[in-house]
Image (spheres, coloured by chain):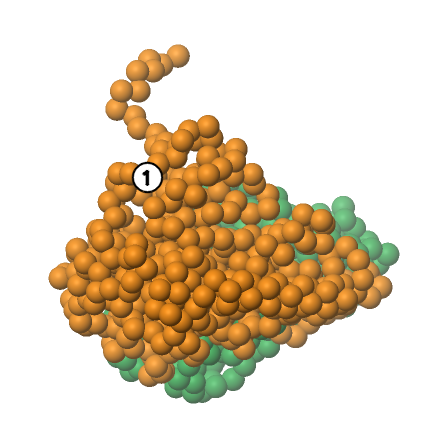
């Protein structure tokens, strides 16, 4: 075990897989020589050569199409979309092509591609470097949507994603790259140093896709969340005065509803938290499934905490970001009515 | 209100509309055999001229002439002719069956059979094909059983797409034929990806892909061209210029201002412009591009200059937007007639043998179709298992799909 931040863990996952499988290649805008704008591929081109780790034209649709073609030809491409805010030119290739190829060809063709992309706000990125578009993709059948919240899960999940024979969309909450984030921008920056989940094996291991993780046990109520909001929710739970259970989904689709249902049926109360905009967000899906499985055990209406339904406002980042205060209000609401 | 002089605004219009008497007298068509054949590793910088001419082998006297003559054996040419005939007869039968409600949709390739059939012949079987929706001749040339193609079109119990795709959106992994998408142009850069992987693995196989001239307007075209040049992909990027994208003529993709082949030049690859109704010329340029790619010369773009003699699909009536007889005056003729006449001219075919071949193929298609119907059609008989619609979304079926299947009771 060694201490890694999330950037190092993601880098390490790709390093491990490049080493183990020469069908793995890594590419995207600036990922080669430069090592990626967040350094997630730093040193990999030097180590594996520019046929395996390379830069691409600035054309997201082309990047994903290239990955699909390579995937069809026995390779396991890991394509980076530099910011998830830039993913839309690739939408057709992801939705109509990668996600449906196995199905539309009757199982004859598939493309085991991994799309890595940083998401989320909290870094003063404005509306083009802060989005959380995961809900747009969770609606698509045939692609697995993943979002880790810490270095250990990030590495283990990314290795699972690369080895997975289905396409995976791997969202990296960039606010967590260098440390956990409690939601308070004025608090001193935290680091993964000394954090349990910053202890990461140097070699190969996997965290399974499709399995949620209880990161705080409790009996009064359940928070279901993922990504950056895991840490905000934990911080809120600490100061809430209630015995709050916090579940980190880790994978959004396929959703681990059994894990969620076990908890919510036990506590009877639930808050769903995500950073993405509220309307039509993935929280609505979680809520629906909890309602379908736990309705008769519920003691209070389920509540959502989410981003407002507006583009990410640069100057009002912290008014937009669903911080501890809003999570605490929601906890109180489901506990006290 | 705004002023509306529109004096510098140009919206292109095709040369003919319904009611006009079609003529193509001013098309610049060089004589067959007049274009030189360069070495396959010639620098793209020295190949500008090939994008602005028309490579032709079969002349109007039915002779094969010039440096591009691939000198195919009579047997090879007869295979080409038979495969083109099979494609046309198959198309006619399937379109008729669509008209009587046996399937939902169909698209013919009438007039452009040489494109797919000659190109498939010029490639190796190990080469990967990323077609658009009008290259059924690729399957026929590579020997796919027509029965399987029909089973797919009928979405019946033996459809290898398991009833999930529109007719003609074939997939055939065994024949290195990629799954056809309904979205235009998406395969263009995917083919480049496949080719890059082949080069990475040090393999000899190349990729070939096809889009229509109308689709060159999509960003996918630009992606494919750029990525192919950047990584020197062993790929052949074909633009089938059949003049019509449903009702929009090629001017709406900018074809009046420059040839489509000349776009290859702009990206830094050879652009070869070929008479798409000349089986031998299509074969020869494809062979040239394949040899170039296999020898590390990288990608080639080919513009196949042809004419879409049928409607776009069973969903449009072409007489609503172009003269019905436009195809009849197309100056480059019909690909089947031209190869047939050449074979007759060299004493390797005859009108009788041709009639006999048509009869045999028609009988074979009829027989296969009857068998295909016995496995069901879209509206009657056996269908793929309903439960199979929950399969292949992922490699392993996740729990939520299993639960949804159980909810449906299948």
State the residue in front, B42 or B287. Answer: B287
| Image x and y of residue A250, in percent | 58, 67
Q: Position of residue B10 (x, y in %)?
A: 30, 28
Name the residue nearer the viewer: B342 or A29: B342
Task: Tell me if A325 is positioned left or right of B49 in this view.
Answer: right
User: What residue does disc 1 label?
Assistant: B24
Q: Nearer the viewer, residue B69 or B274?
A: B69
Q: Quarter-wise, where is residue A289 in the image?
A: bottom right
Residue B161 appears in the rendering: no
The picture places residue A125, in percent across and down from the top left corner, at: 38, 50
Name the subunit of mark 1.
Answer: B
The quadrant holding residue A30 is bottom left
Observer-nearest of B57 and A101:
B57
Chain B: what color? Answer: orange
Task: Tell me the SS state at disc 1.
Answer: loop
Q: Residues within 10 Å of mark 1 (few under 14, many from 20)?
A: few
- In the rendered image, residue B76, in percent from the top left (x then y), is placed at 40, 75
Q: Residue at x 43, y 44 (%)?
A: B327
**Residue at position x 52%, y 35% in the image:** B319
Task: Classify residue B164 as left or right of residue B132.
Answer: right
Compared across the picture, whether B4 is left or right of A179 comes to left
The colour chain A appears in is: green
């Amino acid at each position: 075990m060694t201490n890694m931040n999330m950037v190092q863990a993601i880098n390490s996952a790709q390093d491990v897989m490049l080493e183990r499988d020469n069908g793995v290649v890594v590419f995207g805008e600036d990922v080669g020589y430069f090592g990626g704008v967040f350094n997630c591929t730093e040193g990999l081109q030097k180590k594996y050569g520019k046929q395996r780790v390379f830069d691409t034209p600035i054309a997201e649709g082309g990047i994903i199409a290239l990955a699909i073609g390579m995937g069809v030809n026995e390779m396991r491409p890991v394509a980076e979309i530099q910011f998830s805010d830039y993913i839309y030119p690739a939408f057709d290739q992801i939705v109509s092509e990668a996600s449906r190829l196995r199905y539309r060809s009757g199982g004859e063709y598939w493309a085991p591609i991994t799309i890595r992309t940083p998401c989320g706000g909290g870094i003063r990125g404005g509306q083009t470097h802060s989005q959380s578009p995961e809900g747009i993709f969770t609606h698509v059948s045939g692609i697995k949507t993943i979002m880790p919240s810490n270095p250990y899960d990030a590495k283990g999940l990314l290795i699972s994603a690369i080895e997975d024979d289905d396409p995976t969309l791997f969202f990296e909450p960039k606010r967590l790259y260098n440390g956990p984030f409690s939601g308070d921008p004025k608090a001193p920056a935290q680091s993964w140093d000394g954090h349990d989940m910053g202890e990461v094996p140097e070699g190969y291991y996997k965290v399974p896709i499709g399995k949620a993780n209880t990161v705080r046990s409790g009996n009064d109520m359940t928070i279901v969340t993922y990504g950056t909001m895991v840490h905000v929710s934990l911080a809120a739970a600490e100061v809430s005065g209630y015995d709050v259970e916090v579940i980190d989904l880790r994978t959004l689709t396929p959703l681990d509803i059994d894990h969620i249902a076990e908890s919510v049926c036990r506590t009877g109360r639930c808050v769903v938290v995500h950073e993405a905009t509220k309307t039509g967000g993935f929280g609505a899906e979680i809520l629906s499934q909890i309602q379908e499985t736990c309705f008769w055990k519920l003691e209070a209406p389920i509540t959502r905490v989410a981003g407002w339904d507006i583009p990410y406002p640069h100057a009002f980042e912290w008014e937009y970001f669903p911080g501890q205060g809003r999570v605490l209000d929601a906890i109180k609401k489901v506990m006290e009515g | 209100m705004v002023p509306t002089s529109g004096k510098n605004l140009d919206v292109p219009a095709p040369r003919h509309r319904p009611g006009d008497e079609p003529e193509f007298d001013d098309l610049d068509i060089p004589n067959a055999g007049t274009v030189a054949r360069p070495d396959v590793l010639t620098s793209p910088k020295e190949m500008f001229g090939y994008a602005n001419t028309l490579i032709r082998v079969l002349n109007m006297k039915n002779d094969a002439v010039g440096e591009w003559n691939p000198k195919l054996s009579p047997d090879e040419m007869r295979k080409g002719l038979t495969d083109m005939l099979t494609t046309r007869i198959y198309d006619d039968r399937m379109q008729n069956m669509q008209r009587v409600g046996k399937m939902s949709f169909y698209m013919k390739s009438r007039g452009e059979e040489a494109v797919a059939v000659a190109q498939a012949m010029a490639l190796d079987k190990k080469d990967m094909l990323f077609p658009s929706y009008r290259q059924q001749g690729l399957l026929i040339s590579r020997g796919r059983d027509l029965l399987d193609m029909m089973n797919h079109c009928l979405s019946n119990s033996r459809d290898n797409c398991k009833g999930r795709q529109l007719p003609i959106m074939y997939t055939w992994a065994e024949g290195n034929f990629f799954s056809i998408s309904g979205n235009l142009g998406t395969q263009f850069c995917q083919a480049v990806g496949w080719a890059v992987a082949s080069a990475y693995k040090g393999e000899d196989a190349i990729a070939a892909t096809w889009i229509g001239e109308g689709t060159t307007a999509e960003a996918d075209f630009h992606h494919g061209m750029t990525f192919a040049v950047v990584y020197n992909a062993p790929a052949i990027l074909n633009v089938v210029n059949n003049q019509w994208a449903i009702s929009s003529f090629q001017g709406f993709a900018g074809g009046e201002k420059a040839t489509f082949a000349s776009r290859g030049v702009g990206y830094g690859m050879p652009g070869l412009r070929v008479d798409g109704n000349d089986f031998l010329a299509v074969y020869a340029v494809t062979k040239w591009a394949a040899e170039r790619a296999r020898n590390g010369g990288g990608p080639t773009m080919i513009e196949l200059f042809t004419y879409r003699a049928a409607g776009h699909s069973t969903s449009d009536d072409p007489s609503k937007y172009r003269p019905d007889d436009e195809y009849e005056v197309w100056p480059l003729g019909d690909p089947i007639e031209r190869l047939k006449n050449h074979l007759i001219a060299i004493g390797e075919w005859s009108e009788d043998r041709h009639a006999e071949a048509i009869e045999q193929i028609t009988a074979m298609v009829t027989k296969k179709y009857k068998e295909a119907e016995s496995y069901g059609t879209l509206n009657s008989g056996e269908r793929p298992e309903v439960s199979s619609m929950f399969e292949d979304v992922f490699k392993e079926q996740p729990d939520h799909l299993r639960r949804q299947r159980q909810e449906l009771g299948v």
